Amino acid sequence: MGGQPMFILSEDTQRTRGQDAQSSNIAAGKAVSQAVRTTLGPRGMDKMLVSDAGDVVITNDGATILGEMDIEHPAAQMIVEVAETQEDEVGDGTTTAAVLSGQLLAKAENLLDDDVHPTTIVEGYNEAAALANEAVEGLVLDVDDLDDDRLRAVARTSMTGKGTGDVNAEALAETVVDAVRQVEGDDGVARNEISVRTQTGAASSATELVEGVISEEEPVREDMPTSVEDASIAVLDVEFDIRESSVDAEYDVTNIDQLNAALDAEEKQFKQYAEKLADLDVDVAFVTESIEDRAAASLAEEGILAFESVGDDEAKSITQVTGASRVGAIDDLESDDLGNAESVSVESYGDDDLAFVEGGAAAESVTVFARGSTDHVTDELERALNDGLDVVTAALDAGGVVPGGGASEIAIADHIRDRAASIEGRRQLAVEAFADAIDVLPRTLAENTGMDPIDALVDLRSRHDSEGRAGIISEGQTGQVTDPVEAGVFDPAAVKYEALESATEAATMIVRIDDVISADN
Ligand code: ADP
Ligand code: MG
């Protein structure tokens, strides 16, 4: 085929090429990372985000901030995706990843200005990222030391600086580690068996671990018991209702006697259901379908606590906690199908009723019951708790922990610079630029901690050289350069691997683009 390929763009198409395209993309990426920079670290500030509809979110969480911002620029959107990936993969380090992407772009811009070809930058960045990975591997602390104390420290590191109300980080960290330990099995941590449920109306220090699940259901009738100890539990996918509930569709009713007979027959059926449950000594029934009024009355008469229209996820969790099997017909129900809980109790919180199903030490699902005075507090507490749960899970299941407070970044940059010397040609510049970009993390931590960033960086490097490890540890109003391991500041290694990978990927992708063609709309 000889002809030249030809693209015919509509007149409305906007096209930016070459350096213009690059600098516009880079500027957009940098701007996004700039937006979250001040939130990095324990003394980072919060952002208040107000939506079009006037909803307010107050948060310190990178992924949440970027998710709430209405970001349109496609290159900027890629940095947002970095934060999202980070959140999905490890659940922490979103600000770190976004800030690093932005700085990789800023350094790439300098290289482009110096006429380093984009391909060379991409190669150098990838090479540096591999060196960085190598460095993280060397930083992982002894796995044998991953005891509860250390896990609590990891959890605390991820949660400090999030607005967690009046509750101290130590207590929260303890709750988090207890939760993870409870669902830890031979195959690792069953992270999806831990839920966080928020409820306003109490101080956040009332946050506690429930060894079981909390269901948002209320009993179908008020005259049912609201608290049962050592409860036998049935989980039923059964409709407590006569099929085609309209009476005259089932019976040919011609006079009042027949109608009464029909109603009696139904009532008898419901009674039989309730009696069957009572015969099996069922105390509590979680029913995923609806329960008709008269059926509910029969259940109440038998002293059974029943919930209707229980969600599928909740039904699953309840079976996990109690060991019950779900049964699809009352006739099929046998005592083997019943589960057991230490207690089932219904408690009222303002307008909301919550049912606590507590399985005790054997519960395979647990719930962190997060309390706070307002929605803003509980929402941010929930994010903090999820971060804590994620980092402890990552520490146990995905490669241990590394020193925090910027110490790992100092070591990574040092390792890269060390190796850069032996790299030929202009690629060396790109590798060095990558190391310089990593510096943004300890520098920003220093800045947000109220230290002079240049002095701090110099101090960090010299302490790193002399003592092998140095980080920024925030203390009161300021921070100091010291050993993060001694100070109990750790991040999961997975946070670092993931941040390095996704930040590098996004930055190199953006640098490679030299032509932006957009349909005008
Ligand atoms: P991210 O969204 O990246 O997790 P954070 O605001 O949670 O951002 O900040 C994480 C950084 O803060 C990590 O580098 C962590 O080591 C550091 N950090 C956490 N606690 C402390 C502390 N007490 N002193 C210094 N640095 C800390
Ligand atoms: Mg964090």
Image: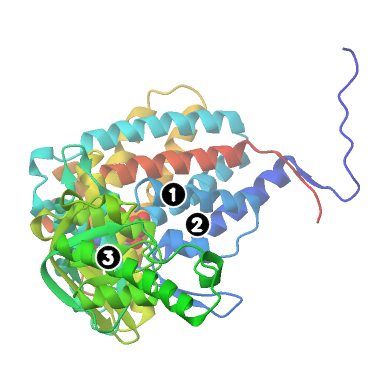
Q: Position of residue 59 (x, y in %)?
A: 40, 70
Which sits earlier in the primary sequence, circle 3 or circle 1?
Answer: 1
Q: What residue lies at 22% left-to-right and 78% top-to-bottom? A: 301
Q: CA distance from mark 2 to mark 1?
A: 8 Å
Circle 2 SS class: helix
Q: Mark 2 and mark 1 in contact? Answer it, CB < 8 Å.
A: yes
Ligand 1 within 8 Å of disc 2? The answer is no
Q: What residue lies at 34% left-to-right and 47% top-to-bottom? A: 90
Q: Nearer the viewer, mark 3 or mark 1?
A: 3
Ligand 2 within 8 Å of disc 3? The answer is no
Using the image as rendered, state which of residue 248 and residue 305 is in the foreground.
248
Q: Amino acid at mark 1?
A: Leu
Q: Amino acid at mark 3?
A: Gln
Q: Which residue is mark 1?
A: 100
Circle 1 SS class: helix
Which sits earlier in the primary sequence, circle 3 or circle 2?
Answer: 2
Q: Which residue is mark 3?
A: 272
Q: Nearer the viewer, mark 3 or mark 2?
A: 3
Task: Please state, as top left, top right, bottom left or bottom right, where the N terminus lies in the image.
Answer: top right
Q: Colour scheme in the image?
A: rainbow
Using the image as rendered, state which of residue 425 and residue 431 is in the foreground.
431
Circle 3 SS class: helix
Q: What residue lies at 53% left-to-right and 79% top-to-bottom? A: 255
Task: Please state, as top left, top right, bottom left or bottom right, where the C terminus lies in the image.
Answer: bottom right
